[in-house]
Amino acid sequence: MALRGGFFTQLQLRQIPRTSPYSLGGTTTKYRSLCLCRQVQTTTSVVTENKPKNESSTSVGAFQKLPMVMPSVDILYSALRKAKRVAPTKGIANIAKRERNKAAKQLDALMKELAVPLRGYKENFPNRKYLHPYEGSLIELTLGDGNYDKILKRVDALRKKVVFIGKEHASLCAKSVSKREAEERLNEGMVRLEEMFNREGKAVDDLLNVAKTLRAMPVVDLETPTLCLVGAPNVGKSSLVRVLSTGKPEVCNYPFTTRGILMGHITLSYQNFQVTDTPGLLKRSDEERNNLEKLTLAVLSHLPTAILYVHDLTGECGTSPSDQFKIYKEIKERFSDHLWLDVISKCDLLNTSPVVFITENRDDEGSEMERYRKMGPEGVIRVSVKNEEGVNELKARVHQQLVAQMERIGSQSNKGEAQAVT
């Protein structure tokens, strides 16, 4: 399975201690687990209620609380080392009984040392159905449809095999009638567990890669106003993110430079805001869109964002102004409830060079599209990152937009609290 990367913000791991420890080989170790609930926010680890089975989370931050996953080889060698140190119960004088007791206890210890971490992974990785819709979409689009659940099922299947084999051979050891037989059955059981874990432990390593991928996803604060840059590929969104925020995207002249969701931050008039750069959208139906485009739609669908839509009328981005116009009309109609701001990028090229649209379909012209080709949408801001034309105006308008988005978030939060009270 290929796991896609391309994310820019690193998350810090946070875990919630469990109240019930597991006993392993005579020692007590507290494992950590994750509990998802409606009241858990990205900056808190307080569990306040259990989530109804049919209700998804209203907060984000589950990826920050993923448990640490050890490589399968480390789990195995650690378990073998601890199991071999287990001694027989004191006071058994009979040599055969003492060896039988030791063999059964060592196999039981090996089984637990292998099975307990696997059970912790199964329990502490969040159920995709109960995640915030945004995080659920990220899992599906980044890891592939159903792959997250399949890997967790493989890990749990491995745990069940470990328990079955461990119990089977521990029972055989307990029935041994001689020291030699107990030693042979102990060796058989350990070899069988080791071979099986080596053969199927790739499920754990796949889960380790999943955890790394999910932790690398950008942190989103639902209470902080967010500006989302949208447009066709290579229209200059990433360059504007560099101008507006702390985000440092890759800026190159080819489509789909942005291979994931980039989160940056803006400080304007001592207020903090978020800005996100998204992969470009092409003129095609949702069924034909790739996962990069679907990431963009997931952000717009599930996060409370204001939209900064970027247009490139120079003819250099690879998407003609006519196609950009059609994409723009579709997205604006679909997300008409969002606050909206339009900007034309690379306007220094429009001022100095004649524009030739080699990909234009002149038969598809209308007065609105013709006006768009020449001037862009009504009320658009013209910006050039190269000579800083319009940058100050853009920052001022973005600030106004984000303040309005903050008021909108506050209003929705107050409505939600009022409904909860009633």
Image: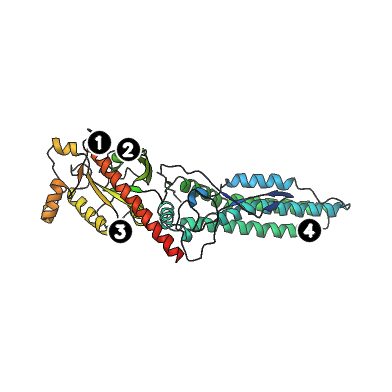
At label 1, counting other C-alpha atoms closer than 10 Å, the crowd grade (few under 14, some 14-19, many 20 or more) is some
Secondary structure category for the residue under label 2? helix
Residue for point 28% across, 44% down: 398
Residue visible at 50% across and 58% down in the picture: 150
Q: CA distance from mark 2 to mark 4?
A: 68 Å
Q: Which residue is mark 3?
A: 286
Dot 1 and dot 2 residues touching (CB under 8 Å): yes
Q: Amino acid at mark 4?
A: Ala
**Which residue ends up furthest to the top in the rendered image?**
387
Q: Which residue is mark 2?
A: 242
Q: Is residue 372 visible?
A: yes
- Looking at marks 3 and 1 on the same chain, the residue that comes earlier in the sequence is marked by 3
Q: CA distance from mark 1 to mark 4?
A: 76 Å
- Residue 29, above or below 413: above
Question: How much space separates mark 3 and mark 1, taking CA atoms?
Answer: 32 Å
The picture places residue 413, in percent across and down from the top left corner, at 40, 57
Q: Which residue is mark 1?
A: 385
